[in-house]
C-alpha cells in the first residue's frame, strides 16, 4: 500500500515555525517510504479565509524545499461531499439542531482549569424552530451505534469520544461543515493512509474515528507529533509572537537551512515503531 500523507492548513493567517514543523513531519514521513504528500487548503471558513494567505502558504512551503504531489485541493470546492455526509448522519437520527449562541454556551459551561469544556446538550431534544442553528452530533447515540472502536497511533488507542469532545458541531451556523466532518470526509476521499499532525489534535481523533465508522470510511494510521514550544514553554503560536515564515523569507533567511534545523528535532518529536528510519536525511 502506498503511503499517503497530507498537510492541510487554513488560509486564515500566515504560517509560522510550528506549521513548518508539522508540514515537514508529514512530507518526510511519506517521502521516506516512497509515498505521496498532498496539500489541502482548508478554506471552508468563508468569513476568515483569504486568497492572499493561500499564495503565501504555497510560497512558504516551496521556500522550505517541500514539494507536494498532484493539484492543491480546496475544501470550498467539496461542499457537496460534506452535505451528503451530513444528510446520511441526519437520516440515522444522530444529529440535532443547536440554537445556542456562543455567549449562552459559555455561560452554561464549567470545567476545571486547563480542561476542555464539554457542551452540556442544552438543545438535545429541544423543539425545532425557525432560527439560525448549527448541527451537533449526539455523541452518546453515535458511540452506541458505532460500537467499540480503536485506532493506531504508536500503538493501539481505544476510542472514547464521549469523554473527549461531547456533542461536537458538524455544521456551523456560518459554515457548511466543521473541521471534524470536513477533515474526516476529505482524508477518506483523498486516500490518506497516514495522518501526521500535532498532539493538540489528538483528542479530536476520538470523534473522527466514530465518524469514520458511521460513514463506513477507511481508517488511516495516525502519528501525532509533539508541538514546538516557545521560550515560555507554551505552544508556538502567533499570539505568542512567533515569527511568520513570510517574515523570515523577507528577512533573507535560507528556507532549506530552516528546514534542516527543524528536522534535527523530528526524531524525538515523532518516534516511529515500525523498524524503519523515521525520516529521510
Image (cartoon, grey):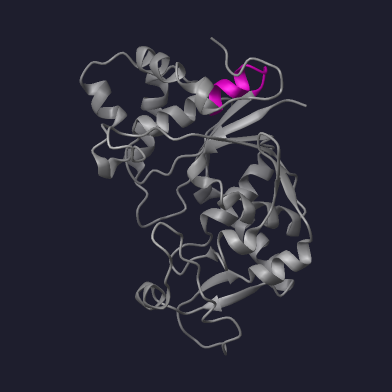
Residue at 64% over, 67% down: 139
Nearer to me, 277 or 27: 277
Q: Residue furthest top?
A: 281
Residue at 56% over, 51% down: 203
Left or right: 25 as drawn, with respect to 93? left
Is residue 239 one of those drawn in magenta?
no
Nearer to me, 187 or 263: 263
Quadrant position of residue 241? top left
Residue at 68% over, 16% down: 276
Residue at 63% over, 15% down: 277
Q: Residue furthest left?
A: 251
**Residue 239: image location, x then y, percent:** 26, 45
Quadrant position of residue 18? top left
Magenta-colored span: 26-35
Q: Residue furthest front?
A: 112
Is residue 33 one of those drawn in magenta?
yes
Quarter of the image for the N terminus: give it. Answer: top right
Left or right: 196 as drawn, with respect to 88? left
Classified by dominant secondary structure, the portion drawn in magenta counts as helix
Amino acid at each position: 500500500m502506498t503511503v499517503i500523507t497530507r498537510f492541510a492548513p487554513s488560509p486564515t493567517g500566515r504560517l509560522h515555525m510550528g506549521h513548518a514543523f508539522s508540514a515537514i513531519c508529514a512530507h518526510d514521513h511519506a517521502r521516506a517510504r516512497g509515498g505521496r504528500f498532498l496539500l489541502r487548503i482548508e478554506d471552508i471558513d468563508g468569513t476568515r479565509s483569504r486568497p492572499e494567505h493561500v499564495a503565501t502558504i504555497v510560497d512558504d512551503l516551496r521556500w522550505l524545499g517541500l514539494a507536494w504531489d498532484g493539484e492543491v485541493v480546496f475544501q470550498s470546492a467539496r461542499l457537496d461531499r460534506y452535505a451528503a455526509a451530513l444528510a446520511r448522519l441526519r437520516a440515522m437520527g444522530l444529529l440535532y439542531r443547536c440554537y445556542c449562541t456562543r455567549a449562552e454556551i459559555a455561560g452554561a459551561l464549567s470545567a476545571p482549569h486547563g480542561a476542555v469544556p464539554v457542551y452540556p446538550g442544552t438543545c438535545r431534544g429541544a423543539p425545532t424552530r425557525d432560527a439560525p442553528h448549527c448541527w451537533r452530533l449526539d455523541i452518546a447515540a453515535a458511540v452506541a451505534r458505532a460500537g467499540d472502536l480503536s485506532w493506531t497511533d504508536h500503538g493501539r488507542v481505544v476510542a472514547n469520544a464521549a469523554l473527549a469532545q461531547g456533542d461536537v458541531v458538524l455544521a456551523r451556523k456560518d459554515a457548511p461543515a466543521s473541521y471534524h466532518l470536513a477533515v474526516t470526509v476529505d482524508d477518506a476521499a483523498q486516500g490518506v493512509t497516514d495522518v501526521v499532525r500535532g498532539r493538540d489534535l489528538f483528542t479530536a481523533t476520538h470523534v473522527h474515528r466514530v465518524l469514520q465508522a458511521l460513514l463506513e470510511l477507511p481508517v488511516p494510521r495516525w502519528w501525532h507529533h509533539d508541538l514546538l514550544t516557545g521560550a515560555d514553554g507554551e505552544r508556538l503560536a502567533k499570539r505568542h509572537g512567533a515569527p511568520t515564515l513570510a517574515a523570515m523569507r523577507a528577512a533573507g533567511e535560507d528556507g532549506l537551512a530552516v528546514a534542516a534545523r527543524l528536522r534535527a528535532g523530528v526524531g524525538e518529536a515523532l518516534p516511529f515503531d515500525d523498524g524503519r528510519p523515521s525520516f529521510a536525511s
